[in-house]
C-alpha cells in the first residue's frame, strides 16, 4: 500500500492504549487515524471509507471480508465500570430499556443478559445518550464510555455489564477488536499494531496525564481503569467469551451468523 493505512478509531478512554501508539509510536507514518464514534467505525469499514478500525465486536458478524489483528482487543473480566445498565427499578422489574445509539456490542450484550441471565423480555428503544431523557421514557438505560465512567447515579440501580456477563458465563467479555478489510490485511501490519499497543503501555504515565485533562477524571480512576478494568489482550479465555457472545446473539436473532474470528496470519 503506497499510502498510509486509513484507521477509524474512537476517543473513548477504554481504547486509548490501542490508538495512542499509532499516532505517537515508531510506526506512526504507516497510519492515518481519524476519531469517530464506535458505531461509525464499523460503518467506515463497511463502506470502504477506512481500511482498519476498532469496531464493536458484534460488527465482525455483520461486515463481510474482515480480518482481525491477533492478540489485541478492548475486553474486561468485570467490572468494566464504563458499560452500565442504569435503572429506576431492580433489574427483575424492568419492562423497557433505552439503548445508547452510540453502541452496538453493548446493546446486544444487555439484551442477552436480560433475556438469558435474568429471564425477562423488556422492550428496547434506541435513544441518544442522555440519561435523564432515557429514564423519562424507559425504566432503564444503557450507558457506555466516558459518560458512564465519570458519573454518579444516586437513587438508581446500577449494573456493570461485564460483571454481569462474568457472573453468567465465567468468562471475560470482548467489547471491541481491531479489524482490517481483507483487501488491506497484509501480515506485515500485525507487528506495527501490536508494537503500537506496547509503545502505549510503556508511556502509560503520559497517557494518564493527558486523559485526566481530557476527561476531567481523577488520576487514580484513569490509571485503575486502564490497568485493572480493561484488558487489551485477546487470549484464549477472551476468545471463548467472544464465541459464546456470538452464539447467543445468533440465537436471539441479533445477528445472522456466528462465524469464528479469522486472524491476519
Image (spheres, rainbow, N blue to C red):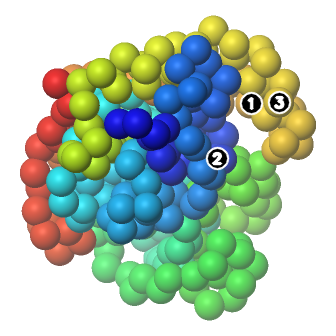
Find residue 14 and report its horizontal and vertical position in percent.
Answer: 59, 39
Measured Cα–Cα span from mark 3 to mark 2? 13 Å
Q: Give the answer, above or below, for where 45 lies relative to 262.
A: below
The residue where tag 1 is placed is 222
Q: Earlier in the sequence, mark 1 or mark 2?
A: 2
Q: Residues within 10 Å of mark 2 (few under 14, many from 20)?
A: some
From the viewer's side, name the closer residue of 262 and 3: 3
Compared across the picture, whether 67 is left or right of 232 comes to left
The reply to whether callout 3 and callout 1 are in contact (CB within 8 Å) is: no
Measured Cα–Cα span from mark 3 to mark 1? 10 Å
**Residue, far front:** 2
Residue 25 can be seen in this image: yes
Residue occupying image coordinates x 79% and y 34%: 211
The residue where tag 2 is placed is 12
Secondary structure beneath label 2: loop
Q: Residues within 10 Å of mark 1 (few under 14, many from 20)?
A: many
Residue occupying image coordinates x 43% and y 61%: 49
Compared across the picture, whether 120 is left or right of 14 comes to left
Q: Residues within 10 Å of mark 3 (few under 14, many from 20)?
A: few
The residue where tag 3 is placed is 210
Amino acid at each position: 500500500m503506497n499510502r498510509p493505512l486509513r484507521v477509524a478509531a474512537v476517543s473513548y478512554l477504554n481504547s486509548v492504549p490501542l490508538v495512542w501508539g499509532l499516532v505517537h509510536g515508531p510506526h506512526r507514518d504507516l497510519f492515518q487515524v481519524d476519531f469517530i464514534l464506535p458505531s461509525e467505525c464499523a460503518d467506515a469499514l463497511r463502506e470502504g471509507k477506512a481500511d482498519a478500525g476498532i469496531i464493536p465486536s458484534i460488527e465482525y458478524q455483520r461486515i463481510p471480508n474482515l480480518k482481525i489483528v491477533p492478540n489485541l482487543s478492548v475486553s474486561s473480566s468485570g467490572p468494566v465500570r464504563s458499560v452500565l445498565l442504569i435503572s429506576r427499578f431492580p433489574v427483575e422489574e424492568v419492562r423497557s430499556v433505552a439503548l445508547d445509539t452510540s453502541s452496538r456490542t453493548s446493546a446486544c450484550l444487555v439484551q442477552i443478559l436480560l433475556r438469558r441471565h435474568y429471564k425477562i423480555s423488556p422492550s428496547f428503544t434506541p435513544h441518544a445518550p442522555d440519561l435523564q431523557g432515557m429514564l423519562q421514557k424507559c425504566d432503564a438505560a444503557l450507558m457506555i464510555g466516558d459518560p458512564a465512567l465519570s458519573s454518579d447515579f444516586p437513587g438508581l440501580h446500577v449494573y456493570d455489564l461485564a460483571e454481569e456477563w462474568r457472573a453468567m458465563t465465567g468468562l471475560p467479555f470482548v467489547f471491541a477488536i481491531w479489524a482490517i478489510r481483507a483487501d488491506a490485511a497484509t501480515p506485515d501490519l500485525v507487528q506495527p499494531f501490536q508494537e503500537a499497543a506496547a509503545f502505549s503501555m510503556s508511556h502509560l504515565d503520559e497517557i494518564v496525564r493527558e486523559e485526566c485533562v481530557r476527561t476531567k477524571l481523577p488520576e487514580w480512576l484513569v490509571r485503575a481503569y486502564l490497568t485493572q478494568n480493561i484488558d487489551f489482550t485477546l487470549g484464549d479465555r477472551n476468545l471463548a467469551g467472544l464465541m459464546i457472545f456470538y452464539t447467543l446473539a445468533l440465537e436471539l436473532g441479533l445477528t445472522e451468523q456466528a462465524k469464528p474470528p479469522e486472524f491476519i496470519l
